[in-house]
Amino acid sequence: MRRLVVAGLAWGALMMPAMAADLNLYKAPPPVPAFTWTGFYFGGDVGGAFSNSNAAWDPPSYRYSCPTIAACVANDVVGLGPGAASGGTGGSAFAGGLLAGYNVQIANNWVAGIEGDWTGMRAGGSFTQPWVGPLTAGGTTTMSSEVEWALSLRGRLGYLIWPNLMAYGTGGAAWADIQYGASAICCGTFTNEPFAGYSSGASFTHMTSGWVAGGGLEWAPFSGFGLLFRVEYLYFDFGGGQNVVAAGNGFNSSGFTWSPTTISVARFGMAYKF
C-alpha cells in the first residue's frame, strides 16, 4: 500500500507542469481596445444639392426720332422699349464627391479635426420671359446659372454621444465654379418693327469664393475596423454676384445681373480611418 501511495505522489509531481501548461492555453483573451477617433481618413459622399440665385435683365432703350424733346414728350413716344425682366435661376441636382481629413480625440468626449472635400453637382435653373412693351411683341429674355462643383476646407469639432457616435459642427472657406448664360432676342423682320433682329447675350464660367457651415452625425460601428458612416448638412454662401453689359446689334446694350449664389447640400458619406 505504501508503495502505491508513493508512486501516486511521484506521478502527480511529474504531471503538474504539463497540467499548468494546458491551463495556460485556455486563459481569457485580452480585452478589445476602445475605438479612437484619432487618425487620417478618406472617403466619399452622395446626396442632393439645392442652389438659390436670382437674375435680372436691364433692357435696351428705344426712342422715336423727334424734331425736339418737347415734341417726343408731347406725343408720348419716349421709352417705348421693353420692360425689365427678372426671375430665379436656382435649382436642385444630385451631388457626389470625395472627402479627406484628420481627427484628434482630445480628453474623453471631444474630437477636433480638419477636412477638405470636393463635390460635383450641376445645380441650377433658368427663366424665360416675353418682352412687355408696345413695340416688342415676340421678344424673349432667358437667363440661367448652374453650380458645376464646390470645394471646401473646414475645421470640425465633435462631441461623443457614445464612444463610437459623434455629433459635430463644421465651418470654413469654400469655392465654387458657376456657369452663367443669358440671351435677349427680338423680334420679327419687318422694317417698321424697331427691335426687329435684336440679339444680345452672354455665356461664361466664373470661379467664386465664400464660406460654408454645417454639421452632422458620424458613426464608427466596428471598434476594431476604421469604417466611418455619416449624415451631414452643409450651407454654402458665395458673396459675389455677376454683372455683364452685352452689346446689342444696332441698339443700346443689354445689362444682365446675377445675385450671389447660396447652396444647401444634404448627403450621406462613408470613409475609412487609417
Image (cartoon, rainbow, N blue to C red):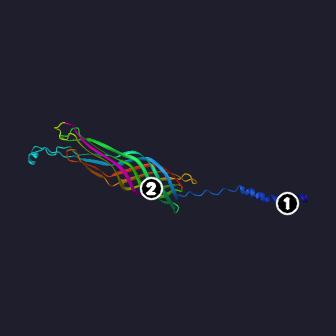
Q: Which residues are magenta?
A: 169-189
Q: Where does the N terminus fall, quadrant-wise?
A: bottom right
Q: Position of residue 180 (x, y in %)?
A: 32, 47
- Which label number is shown at residue 49? none
- State yes or no: residue 187 in magenta: yes
Q: Which residue is mark 2?
A: 116
Q: Nearer the viewer, mark 1 or mark 2?
A: 2
Dot 2 lies on which element? strand
Residue matched to label 1: 10
Q: Residue at x 72, y 57 (%)?
A: 24
- Count of numbered circles in the view: 2
Drawn side of residue 211 relative to residue 81, left or right:
right
Element marked by disc 1: helix
Quadrant (top left, top right, bottom left, bottom right) of the C terminus: bottom right
Name the residue nearer the viewer: 35 or 180: 180
Q: Residue at x 41, y 55 (%)?
A: 152
Amino acid type at image mark 1: Ala
Q: Is residue 189 above or below residue 212?
A: above
Mark 1–mark 2 distance (CA, rounded to whole Å): 72 Å
Which of disc 2 and disc 1 is earlier in sequence? Answer: 1
